[in-house]
Image (spheres, rainbow, N blue to C red):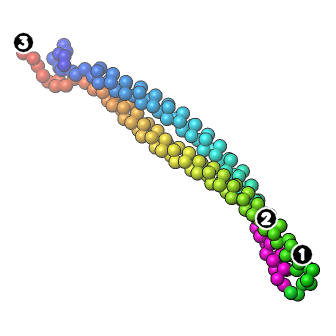
Amino acid sequence: MSGTHDNSITFSTALDNAQLEKDLAGLTKKIEKQEQKIAELSAKRDEAREKGLFDMKTLDREKAKLHEIEEKLAKIRAVAKDKSFGAGAREDAKMQIPVVQQERRDQQTRVNALQAEWNKTQNAAERYAAQLSEAEDTLNRQKVEAGDLVRQIEEASRKAMTPIFPEAVFSK
């Protein structure tokens, strides 16, 4: 506290402002880092999504091919059992069954591998999205905190020159 020439008392807020400004500067750096982190996470999430979209189209094509093979196998089995076909046709069908079954197993293996890769890609995209959401929440909290600090600094600056106890008179 210091006395002024008009016999009023004022409080110095220079120390309070210095600490608030230091806190604000540190928070501003954190905000900048958080914004950079969000940009990096966004890029990684987008990259994972793009890869996932491509893999999904491929996966859909391979699943359709598997379905076609399964239908072909069902028709061949039906011919092999249907006595309305001649013995030669039934024998040919029976001989095709192991070949088509192997084709089906191979295709199922391809589908399983693609499905596993697509799931992995989707999980990565979802993880990035969750991290991004958390980072954005943190950034929003930091911005609110920075706004509060700015208001405190402005308020302290206004109060710095406002006399307290203006009616106080010191006896000499």
Judging by the rendered image, the residue that carries numbered circle 2 is: 102
The disc, 1 or 2, on the residue closer to the chain's N-terminal end is 1
Q: Which residue is mark 3?
A: 172
Classify 1 as above or below 131.
above
Q: Which mark is residue 113?
A: none
Circle 1 SS class: helix
Label 1, on which residue? Answer: 92
Q: Quadrant of the N terminus?
A: top left
Toward the bottom, the furthest residue is: 84
What residue range appears in magenta?
66-82
The residue closer to the viewer here, 35 or 158, is 35
Regarding residue 121, the answer to whether it shows in the image is yes
Q: Residues within 10 Å of mark 1 (few under 14, many from 20)?
A: few
Q: Amino acid at mark 3?
A: Lys
Q: Nearer the viewer, mark 3 or mark 2?
A: 2
Q: Is residue 17 inside the magenta stretch? A: no
Q: Quadrant of residue 152?
A: top left
